[in-house]
Amino acid sequence: MYYQLLGPEIAVATLGLLILAIGLLLPSHGKTAAGYLATVSLLAVLIAVIVNFNQEAVFFAGVYQIDRYANFFRILFLTAALLIILMSSRFTSLFGARQSEWFSFMLFATAGMMIMVAAGDLITVYVGLELMTISFYILSAYLLNDRFSAEAGLKYLIIGAFSSAVLLFGMSLVYACSGTTVFTEIYAALQAGPERPALLAGMVMMLAGLGFKISAVPFHMWTPDIYQGSPTPVTAYLSVASKAAGFAVLVRIFLLAFPAVSWDWRLALAVLAALTIVIGNLTALVQTNVKRMLAYSSIAQAGYILVGLIAANTYGLKGLLFYAMLYVFSNVGAFAVTALVEVEEGSTEREAFNGLGRRAPMPAAVLTICMLSLAGIPPMAGFAGKFYLFSGAIQAGYLWLAFIGLLMSMISVYYYLNVAKAMYIGPSRRESLITLPFPVRTALWLCLLGTLFLGVYPGPLSELTELAVQVFTTV
């Protein structure tokens, strides 16, 4: 057994506990040390995962499995965590003496996501999901003196607990019908035995529970308020990493455990994806708060990513993974600039972005390029990602879904360019230049380069995703 392959999860969890202890033992210097330690350690873990990308092993009789698919998402989560920590170096001053604990909960959330994507059975999925979700409950309400943050934390706790209960109930029904919680054994049991209404109910409840995590319509109602009220770095991490973890689990469960069932879950997901794309984009059109606009944009992006699972072919699954990775760079870049404006202006209303192109040319350019990427404009990375997704949908016979996605992508350009208009044309109350700390500047450059490189030269990431999806295409 290659037990060293479990090292990344163990290292991230241990690092979270270590930073928590440092904050208690060194309250005066712990805040600075926590940020540096988290950044350097996460970078080391990321390098270790990349080096061992092709290493595969199954642990505990199929309960936990490290494969290329899990390694791909581990890279995604660690990359997102690094970018979030870098972009938040200025924002964390608002946390006061609780900065080190903030880094700890970020690491615990990351460990939960890594457990989710490598899980081979339902119970392990639930354990990883709860570790991630409970961490986000705390992080969402981390601004103690902000009533919107307190409201976000309370709403997320109540709605998240309800969705977790629905998911767990669905898992119990699937277990009752199959007699096992391991994905591959569920598949074998469902092939051998007769279908039961309880199984369909369990699948629908699991879809509802995971639909909450990915913000798919009609399970999206929590997203705008919680994204707007949470600290902006937390919102960014919720929108990219938490969503990606939900998709990773959804793909593994539905393709490895449920393809033998006659219920056409792909058609049901196609309807959900279409509604998610349409409602997310149309509602974003009327938003004047940029954080809230990005929240509805995030809902629409979930619909695009869902297209890859619906297609369930090589192009679709490659597109899902490709888009999830580029979404990290584009969305974190957008939220990094939003956090910068929030600290400077105390607001994320669109008017707060007026004149940003003159006061901070580099962040304004990054935000514009990242938003154009989210809209799918070439040569940004979003174009390549949507090309893979829509190609997979057309190959699978969902031409109508690809058409809806293409139409809504064109509509999304309007609300993204409204922000660019404010930055470059809008009148500014201030003319003083905004200074960028080195970590924030580094995060912005990484997001910019990632968004442009993956659009101009998508080959390396495309090959990586092709290796990662072989766990499904060879089944």
Image: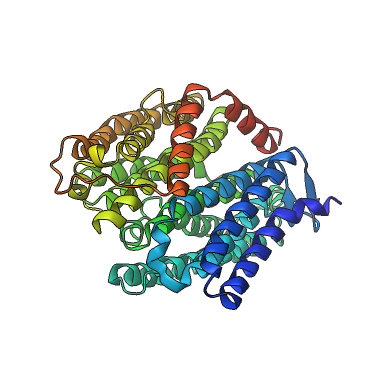
Q: Residue at x 25, y 42 (%)?
A: 359
Q: Residue at x 80, y 58 (%)?
A: 60
Q: Is residue 275 left or right of residue 452?
A: left
Residue 382 in percent (x, y) is at: 42, 31
Q: Toward which corner of the image does residue 69 lie, by quadrant? A: top right
The answer to whether any part of residue 449 appears in the image is yes
Colour setting = rainbow
Instruction: Look at the image and tell me in which quarter the C terminus lies.
Output: top right
Looking at the image, is 39 positioned above or below residue 143? above
Q: Is residue 355 left or right of residue 273?
A: left
Q: Which residue is more in the foreground, 435 or 409?
A: 435
Q: Residue at x 50, y 56 (%)?
A: 210
Q: Which residue is more in the foreground, 151 or 25?
A: 25
Looking at the image, is 314 positioned above or below residue 355? above
Q: Which residue is more in the foreground, 268 or 390?
A: 390
Q: Residue at x 37, y 66 (%)?
A: 94
The answer to whether any part of residue 134 appears in the image is no
The residue furthest right is: 1
Looking at the image, is 111 positioned above or below residue 359? below
Q: How many marks?
A: 0
Residue 356 in percent (x, y) is at: 24, 42
Residue 414 in percent (x, y) is at: 23, 34
Residue 63 in percent (x, y) is at: 74, 57
Q: Toward which corner of the image does residue 172 lie, by quadrant? A: bottom right
